[in-house]
Image (cartoon, coloured by chain):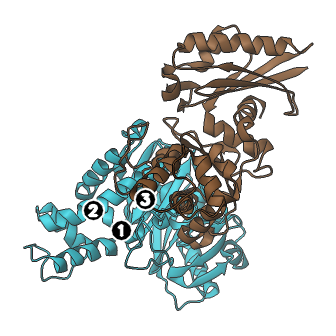
Chain colours: A brown, B cyan
Amino acid sequence: MHVWIGIDVGGQSAKFGLFDAKGSLLDTDSLPTGKEKEPEAAIHEMALHVRALVARHEDAELSGIGVGVPGPVLEENIVNKCVNLDWDVVPVADLFQQEGFTCPVKVENDANVAALGELWQGAAVGHTSILFIVIGTGVGGGVVINGKVVSGVHGAGGEIGHMPILAEKAERTCGCGGHHCLELAASAPAIADLARRLLAETEEASLLRDQEISAKEVFDAARAQDPLAQRVVAQAAEVLGRAIAILTSTVDPEMVVLGGGVSEAGETLLKPVRDAYRKAAFYALQETPIVRAELGNRAGMVGAAYLVLQ
Amino acid sequence: MHVWIGIDVGGQSAKFGLFDAKGSLLDTDSLPTGKEKEPEAAIHEMALHVRALVARHEDAELSGIGVGVPGPVLEENIVNKCVNLDWDVVPVADLFQQEGFTCPVKVENDANVAALGELWQGAAVGHTSILFIVIGTGVGGGVVINGKVVSGVHGAGGEIGHMPILAEKAERTCGCGGHHCLELAASAPAIADLARRLLAETEEASLLRDQEISAKEVFDAARAQDPLAQRVVAQAAEVLGRAIAILTSTVDPEMVVLGGGVSEAGETLLKPVRDAYRKAAFYALQETPIVRAELGNRAGMVGAAYLVLQ
């Protein structure tokens, strides 16, 4: 039986999925990652896990390894810096091949592979052109046109968390060094931060007062009709909706898919984002659907397998 | 001899070019256009001009007609509203074929064909992924990825003049009905308008005082070191540079090409745009070249021919 491995390499863990030719997920595994591991050692460890995962299945013949990584990827499957892993330029495919694999190895940015995952098996099944936005600790994205990821010349296609949408310089500095990034207005930490600032600025009663605040608490409070929390969500949604309107006027996709931890807020996030989007969007694009991702944190693993299975 | 016709349909005139198989421009013609002509009558007139143009060349055999139009174009070569021509939904290719042409007829948005023109014979020769921005009475654009125009599901790919980049609602309303469009900050009328506002707000001496102001006068004055004119150019360039940085972080092209009447200001525009771009751009994208278009108002005609010649 031919099998394919999809690996989603994150800042905290690498998730492994073993797929058959139909794209069914047969088995999974995972492994802690982190900045303290050198890239060569990290990939050696991943290679051991791939072998062990394949060995668990009798007659399994490994036919390809797809890898999603949290950084820009150049044409030759070379990673061009991963801040979260403290990787510089790392020839990921070459390093896997040096571990003795003879099957094809393909590498793409993690948000791009998640976009492919949603296209293949998730919210965008049956579509060929989508915009995928993942909102969590950071904001990432993937642009897929006619079934192909727009990777870009520097591997920075779909780096929409770093689009300089903020006209005014933000107080905080983005992980990328920028001060105008979408990520500074719409990531989970940015949402929590905005709530903290509004709480500090006013005496207004709020469910969020005197507690630890994360984006989840903000959305929970907004759902419970807390006015301050609702203002926070509205502000983040306004920027996100406008960002999506900028993106649709550029690539005019069939659908926009929102994933990542923040998208778990569901309609509490999606409805204000759709409202803000329609207000900002070009007239021909106001009906472009904005939907929630369906694969959750499996999207990267699935899309990584799709890189070598497609 | 096989020949191909490229037609660039504008709000004031339609330009016709006759090309050979190598893409050399052998002959041209033009025709006034305008809102008073019904689309069927306008296309009938264009058809007569095509026939006359081909007939001027002995043994010429018409092998294709490419048409660029100032509006969104749907997949089936149908125009979906041209504000400048007062066209609603017009099946341009069908209408040409009803005029008796049996050769292929392809239709694309005018900025998209101009992008293809620059890629084929202009500033971006040898490239496959570019972002083209045309700045004149309006602001338009074309995104080309791997040699193909990103037309979009609603024909609105590259409609970057209508990207809602302005966070604050602008005083004026865009032709599209929007209030946050790039066009409201960076088109020729927007630049002239900003100069008029700054002149009215201050008593500052300026070469621009007490004269009719167009974008050209603003750039001439900026070149002559007029501080007020330089501030106007800097403001427009700041928004344009940030818009380009948003676009490169989305599609990461090899090159950005600026065309249209405003780009004739040359380095007086390009230098501040590049400076603003570098300040705003994602670190991996700061060296993306921003160059001036080379084909001038021939770009549309050339790119339209490329639609059927490629």
Residue drawn at the location 71% of the way across and 56% of the way down: A291
| Percent position of residue A267, x then y | 69, 59
Q: Position of residue B60 (x, y in %)?
A: 59, 64
Q: Position of residue A79 (x, y in %)?
A: 54, 25
B17 or B190: nearer the eye? B190
Find residue A65 and report its image quarter.
top right
Viewport quadrant of the N terminus of chain A: top right
- The residue lying at 54 percent from left, 13 percent from top is A37
Q: Can residue B61 be seen in this snapshot?
A: no
Q: Residues within 10 Å of mark 3 (few under 14, many from 20)?
A: many
Earlier residue among tags 3 and 1: 3
Residue lying at the far left of the rendered structure = B205
Q: Which residue is mark 3?
A: B133
Instruction: Give the mark, 2 or 1, whose residue is nearer the N terminus.
Output: 1
Quadrant of residue A274 in the image?
bottom right
The answer to whether A75 is drawn above or below residue A197 in the figure is above
Chain letter behind tag 3: B
Q: Residue at x 22, y 73 (%)?
A: B195
Tell me, yes or no, whether dots 2 and 1 are on the same chain. Answer: yes
Circle 2/circle 1 CB separation < 8 Å: yes
Q: Which mark is drawn over residue B185? A: 1
Position of the C terminus of chain A by quadrant? top right
Q: Disc 2 marks which amino acid?
A: Gln
Say how many tags the image has: 3
Dot 3 amino acid type: Ile
- Left or right of B143: which side holds A174? left
Q: Residue furthest bottom?
A: B36
The CA span between labels 2 and 3 is 18 Å
Can you tell which of label 3 and label 1 is closer to the viewer? 1
Q: Nearer the viewer, residue B179 or A168?
A: A168
